[in-house]
Amino acid sequence: MGLLLSGLGLATAHAQPKPSSPCAVHQEIDFKAPPSRVYEILLDAKQFSAFTRDPAEIEPRPGGAFKLFGARVEGRNIELIPTRRIVQAWRSNAWPAAAYSIVHFELAPGAQGSRLILDHTGFPDGEQQSLTEGWPRMYWEPLRKYLAA
């Protein structure tokens, strides 16, 4: 069940799948950096490119477009609450053209820096395992290394 957005006008027909749904990924990650730093890195094209080692274009404003990992992932920022929340209409370029999912990044202070809670919903059937494995491999592990440098 993919989320379809009409030309990214963000007119959504979305039902939030339950966390146990085959179309939802929930992950909680701790970083040794304050929420403000993690937020900044996720929305700054230069820093995003530095930690992923792939080209990125990011317009860090609500409605702003992004292209990540050399345009293999693209979408728009829907909601931005500085240092606390990023909500994106997010899609892989391997998905059908009108298929967008919703990615929520929630940031809060943690024991040694920050806790990031990821909820990724509404992606096409059959993508659960790839995304569950892909977030740590493509985001969390490289981001930890970047923050430690």
Image: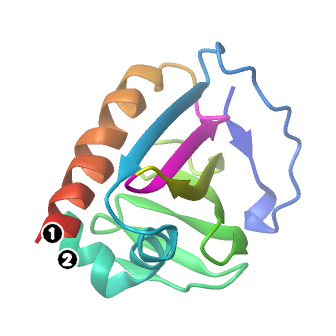
Q: Secondary structure at mark 2?
A: helix
Q: Residue at x 46, y 26 (%)?
A: 127
Quarter where residue 22 is shown: top right
Dominant SS type (magenta): strand
* The residue stretch that appears in magenta: 112-124
Q: Quadrant of the C terminus?
A: bottom left
Q: For mark 2, what is the residue?
A: 50
The reply, left or right, for residue 112 in relation to residue 21 is left
Q: Are marks 2 and 1 in contact (CB under 8 Å)?
A: yes
Q: Residue at x 61, y 39 (%)?
A: 119
Task: Identify the residue at image location x=64%, y=81%.
Answer: 64
Q: Nearer the viewer, residue 38 or 93?
A: 38
Q: How many marks?
A: 2
Asked whether, in this view, residue 109 is left or right of residue 40, the answer is right
Numbered label attached to residue 28: none
Q: Which residue is mark 1?
A: 53
Q: Classify 79 as above or below 103.
A: below
